[in-house]
Amino acid sequence: MIKHAEWLIVGNSKDFPNRIGRTIRLDDNEIAVFRTSENKLYAVENSSPHPKGGPLTEAMVSGHYIYDPLCDWKIDLETGIVQEPDHGQIKTFTIREDGDEVKISL
């Protein structure tokens, strides 16, 4: 049996400006949503993979990467993988725009 994705509306497209993180809470998940300057949306868990932790919504966005605000680790928004020489990974979520609505699949 194939499980179909459940899409949850998390806001209006205008609520997600370029290069600014926004925190979304869905069920037990705290998600950081970013829109790149190329107008692409990404959704990742809002927790740094660094041992000190911390939220990622204050991260600086450059291309499809964010820079962790506490330790400056470079994280790929597409895969959640921390770039070398550092290491780690964060969870990514599927996100899409449907008309003016932004939706995330858990």
Image (tube, rainbow, N blue to C red):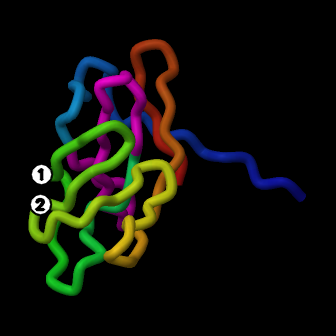
Q: Nearer the viewer, residue 96 or 52?
A: 52
Question: Looking at the image, is 63 positioned above or below residue 5?
Answer: above
Q: Position of residue 88 (x, y in %)?
A: 39, 77
In reply to whether residue 83 is colored magenta, the answer given is no
User: Circle 2 is placed at which residue position?
Assistant: 69
Quarter holding residue 45: bottom left
- Type of amino acid under label 2: Pro
Circle 2: element type: loop
- The residue sitting at 23% across, 26% down in the picture is 18
In reply to whether residue 25 is colored magenta, the answer given is yes
Which residues lie in the magenta part?
Answer: 22-42
- Type of amino acid under label 1: Glu
Residue found at the far front of this picture: 85
Q: Give the number of the disc on residue 58.
A: 1
Q: Position of residue 46 (x, y in %)?
A: 27, 61
- The residue sitting at 18% across, 77% down in the picture is 53
Residue found at the far right of this picture: 1
Query: Badge 2: few (under 14), some or many (20 or more) residues near its Cα, within 10 Å?
Result: some
Question: Looking at the image, is 102 positioned above or below residue 48?
Answer: above
